[in-house]
């Protein structure tokens, strides 16, 4: 691995002799054992020893720098950090410093997880990481320049690049809680004209406004100390899905988490589900609504029941057409506790029939072009371990939600009935300041399309079309809403063939015109009788006239045919 350590003869350079006052200020005054990773010539460690009574060890792979560090530190490993960690004692340090180190590593995720094991109880990790979202870098990139430098954000020895968001993901994936995320500033921020232009195109300028002149992130992290097993309420919604629900409950009741309850909400089933659930799963709480309230209404019944118990800290909403990994709750809770602002956490959805193939990891909001969401099939595992990623939204088949989120923004919006309510809920949560994560260590296996049928079924077309318009009405500006509405109206108009008036071949021109018009009417009628086209037409009509909730009976008739 090419690093500054290859510089050998230029050791006299200032690069290895920084005391790093901004890092020194973050090292606890009561730390008695400190490990400085990438210690250079030992200037920072020496400053720590002068300031307080502490043993300071260092790791430095440049031999000449390590030699100088041994003159002022108590012990130095002169080798790469990956090798040194094999010899460093577990739980041995009150504070570990990794200043400008992680971006040089091939696998910072795995290395950071190993560093975590070296901290003692109550220990603190201090790190600094360059910000690739700095406007100096982005403005050069917009002009086609990506030029590596001898040092700085584009240091030619950097192997990994980070933004605020990916810094958080890096530390969460290693099991750290970020106690504080500070910054150093350098350069200019983008002008408000640039930010305004971005927002006119549907791109949020919030992150660039926040970090456009951020040069480095200063991280203070610790191992979280929380209730290891907060109570989780698992809600399974059933509507005439007895076979799937039985398989789902069998897998849910095999979960290894010690503190959860299962609530089944039956949405007016007529297939005998209720009696079978009572007989086979007597420990499960069964709530019968008596009618089909949809995904939003049915789950809200279960959520209210779950939150009536003040001990319930998380609600896990599950589709009945999936099975779950036995570690599902343990892994989701383990990720969610890493930051109090993590409000929603979700697993990776795999195909039930192809258990190693990802169906969806998370949902990404389209901000350019036609507004909406795309399901991502990305594998969010880091190179060497399971990862955590901040996302726009989660797939509604499996979502774990912290109690305070409901107390802040309310329940699912029942106007949606089915489809897009999870994206609406996610956007409301993000607007309230909560973060949403997908956790690759958590897994479910999904029987795709059991509730709505095939991807192009009339019912799916109806709910996706109408509810995406409703979502846009609630969350997007007028321009973006009009783009989406025009797109749907255009799709409907395309089903109407062009009117071709012709008298060719007819002795009577008037009869030829009538024949052309009749042909056009028949073609138009045939096109509009297509179930998908008819479903889209009713979806747009119901949106315009604010007819929300369940779909019209004619859509269910189309579904059956």
Image (cartoon, rainbow, N blue to C red):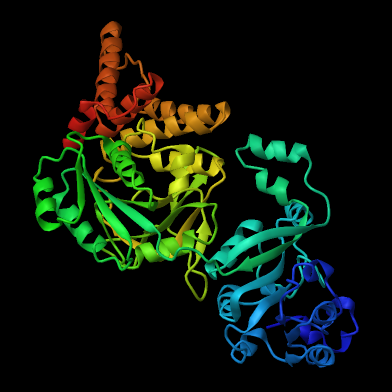
Q: Where on the picture, by quarter, is residue 558?
A: top left
233 relative to 320 in the view: left or right: right
Q: Position of residue 404 (x, y in %)?
A: 47, 46
195 relative to 493 in the view: left or right: right
Q: Is residue 171 above or below residue 493?
A: below
Q: What residue sits 71% from the left and 36% below the top?
A: 196
Q: Quadrant of the image for the N terminus?
A: bottom right
Numbered marks: total: 0
305 relative to 121 in the view: left or right: left
Q: Can residue 345 be seen at all in this image of the molecule?
A: yes
544 relative to 181 in the view: left or right: left
Q: Nearer the viewer, residue 7 or 346?
A: 346
Q: Where on the picture, by quarter, is residue 150?
A: bottom right
Q: Position of residue 513 (x, y in %)?
A: 30, 11
Q: Quadrant of the image for the C terminus?
A: top left
Q: Nearer the viewer, residue 553 or 130?
A: 130
Q: Position of residue 471 (x, y in %)?
A: 45, 34
Q: Nearer the viewer, residue 91 or 426?
A: 91
Q: Can residue 561 be seen at all in this image of the molecule?
A: no
Q: What residue sits 61% from the left and 87% below the top?
A: 85
Q: Position of residue 22 (x, y in %)?
A: 81, 66
């Amino acid at each position: 691995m090419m690093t500054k350590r290859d510089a050998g003869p230029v050791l006299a350079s200032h690069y290895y002799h920084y005391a790093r006052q901004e890092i020194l200020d973050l090292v606890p005054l009561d730390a008695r054992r400190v490990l400085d990773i990438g210690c250079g010539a030992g200037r920072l460690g020496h400053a720590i020893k002068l300031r307080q009574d502490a043993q300071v060890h260092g790791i430095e792979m440049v031999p000449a720098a390590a030699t100088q560090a041994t003159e002022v530190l108590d012990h130095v490993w002169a080798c790469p950090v990956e090798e040194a960690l094999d010899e460093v004692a577990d739980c041995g340090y009150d504070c570990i410093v990794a200043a400008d180190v992680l971006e040089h590593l091939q696998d910072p995720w795995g290395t950071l997880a190993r560093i975590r094991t070296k901290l003692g109880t109550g220990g603190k990790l201090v790190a600094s990481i360059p910000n690739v979202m700095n406007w100096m870098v982005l403005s050069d990139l917009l002009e086609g320049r990506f030029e590596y430098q001898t040092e700085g954000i584009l240091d030619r020895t950097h192997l990994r690049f980070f933004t605020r968001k990916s810094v958080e993901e890096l530390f969460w994936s290693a099991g750290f809680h970020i106690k504080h995320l500070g910054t150093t500033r350098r350069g200019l921020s983008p002008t408000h004209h640039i930010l305004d232009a971005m927002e006119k195109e549907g791109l949020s300028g919030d992150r660039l406004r926040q970090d456009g002149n951020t040069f480095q992130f200063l991280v203070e992290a610790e191992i979280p100390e929380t209730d290891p097993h907060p109570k989780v309420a698992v809600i399974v919604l059933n509507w005439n899905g007895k076979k799937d629900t039985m398989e789902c409950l069998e897998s849910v009741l095999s979960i290894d988490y010690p503190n959860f309850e299962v609530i089944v909400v039956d949405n007016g089933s007529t297939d005998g589900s209720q009696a079978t659930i009572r007989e086979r799963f007597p420990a499960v709480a069964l709530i019968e609504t008596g009618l089909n309230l949809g995904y939003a209404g049915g789950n809200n019944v279960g959520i209210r029941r779950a939150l009536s118990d003040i001990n319930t800290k998380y609600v896990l909403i599950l589709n009945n057409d999936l099975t779950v990994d036995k570690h599902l709750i343990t892994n989701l809770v383990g990720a969610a506790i890493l930051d109090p602002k993590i409000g929603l956490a979700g697993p990776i959805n795999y195909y039930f029939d192809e258990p190693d193939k990802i169906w969806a990891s998370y949902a990404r909001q389209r901000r350019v072009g036609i507004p909406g969401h795309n399901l991502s099939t990305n594998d969010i595992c880091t190179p060497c371990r399971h990862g955590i990623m901040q996302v726009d939204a989660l797939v509604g088949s499996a979502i774990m939600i912290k109690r305070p989120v409901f107390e802040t923004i309310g329940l699912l919006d029942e106007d949606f009935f089915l489809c897009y309510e999870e994206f609406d809920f996610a956007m409301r949560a993000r607007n309230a300041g909560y973060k949403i994560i997908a956790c690759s260590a958590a897994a479910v296996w999904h029987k795709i399309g059991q509730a709505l049928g095939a991807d192009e079924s009339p019912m799916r077309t109806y709910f996706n079309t109408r509810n995406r318009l409703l979502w846009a009405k609630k969350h997007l500006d007028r321009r973006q809403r009009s783009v989406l509405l025009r797109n749907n109206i255009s799709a409907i108009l395309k089903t109407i063939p062009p009117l071709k008036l012709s008298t060719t071949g007819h002795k009577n021109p008037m009869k030829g015109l009538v024949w052309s018009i009749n042909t056009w009417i028949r073609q138009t009628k045939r096109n509009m009788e297509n179930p998908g086209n008819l479903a889209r037409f009713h979806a747009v009509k119901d949106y315009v006239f604010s007819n929300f909730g369940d779909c019209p009976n004619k859509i269910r008739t189309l579904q059956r045919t």
